[in-house]
Amino acid sequence: MAKAAIVIVCMNNLKNLFPCLDSIKEHTKISYEVWVVAYLFSKGNLKLLREKYPWVIVVESNEIRGFSENNNLALRQVQTEYTLVLNDDTLFKEPVLDELVDAMEKTPEAKVMSPYIQNLDGSKQFNGRNPRRWFDFILGDSFGVNLDMKPSKYVDQNGIYQTYNLMGACFLIKQDYFRSLNFFDEYYFFCPEDIALSTLINQKGDECYVDAESKVVHLGGGTRISPVKVATLPAARKGGVYFYSQNIWWKKFILSSVIIVFSMLKMIYFATIKRNKIEFLAQWHSIIAMFSYKTPKELFTKFYLDLKNKK
């Protein structure tokens, strides 16, 4: 049996997926298997994936599902000792999986090991992540504050060190432990499933770590500029309010109210100055989401199907 499994969710985007798979093959020596959740793949792309990468285990996902639900399709089948959850828009420039497994085995108290995540030009994207408080959601979402720039013992350290939050783009976890947590919480459709998982791990008294010597490239940014943002943004904000409020009514009221006010201001900006219809609709749908009892998945489905029907 392989030592580790790599689980990748890809939404019919071979431009991201194939370079990712090639980089894994080139830079990995440890025994491993790769699971690709082929999300809403065209028949042609599915055939091409299987022909070009026969060593990949393909899990077809042909219904609307979020990041958590899609990952769980493969995660529930994995039987290896370790699992690396990996975005399709990542690249190995070094033996990342080998390094993370080695770091995990050197750190028995670690349940999760994340790498240093960098941009394509080598600059830092994430080196550890700080804890999140309920009002941090306002700072991050409405004011664009990078919550991991604040110096602390959880970020920007050297070597192997304890952090608080893992990064969903790439992290290694002990599979039996992941199973005991029932994998990702499927309420979250598009964020903040990684923060929710990290918080659960910490609440259990367990620890997340970073190996800052292991580096992975994360390209990122695709959905932020895509028309699909009209569906992903309201789903993400609904999930954020749910997580950060912890079902406490006054927190939920404050967070929802702030999102409504800032979304209105941004609608005016995108309508009059930027004249950006996608951004305008994303903000309008976020307002609708705050008044809705629908789940993030239900919201995404509604706005995504509306978008497809208009094409």
Image: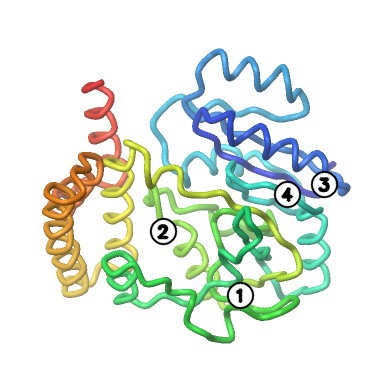
Residue at image mark 4: 92
Q: Contact (CB < 8 A) between labels 3 and 4?
A: yes
Specify the farthest residue to the front. 273
**From the viewer's perspective, is the residue at label 1 or at label 2 nearer?**
2
Residue at image mark 1: 206
**Residue 143 at what x, y percent from top left?**
28, 70
Would you say residue 179 is visible in this rendering?
no
User: Which three-letter amino acid code belongs to the residue tagged 4?
Assistant: Phe
Judged from the image, the secondary structure of the residue bearing numbered disc 1 is loop
- Relative to 250, say whether 126 is above or below: above
Q: Who is closer to the viewer here, 1 or 58?
A: 58
Residue ID at (70%, 30%): 57
Label disc, if present, on residue 27 of the rendered structure: 3
- Relative to 218, say whether 151 is above or below: below
Would you say residue 161 is visible in this rendering?
yes
Residue ID at (53%, 30%): 13
**Residue 240 at what x, y percent from top left?**
32, 61
User: Which three-letter amino acid code belongs to the residue tagged 2?
Assistant: Pro
Pointer 4 or 2: first along the chain: 4
Pointer 1 or 4: first along the chain: 4
**From the viewer's perspective, is the residue at label 4 or at label 2 nearer?**
4
Q: Quadrant of residue 269?
A: bottom left
User: Which three-letter amino acid code belongs to the residue tagged 3?
Assistant: His
State the separation of the CA atoms marked 4 and 2. 24 Å
Residue at image mark 2: 192
Q: Residues within 10 Å of mark 3 (few under 14, many from 20)?
A: some
State the separation of the CA atoms marked 3 and 4. 7 Å
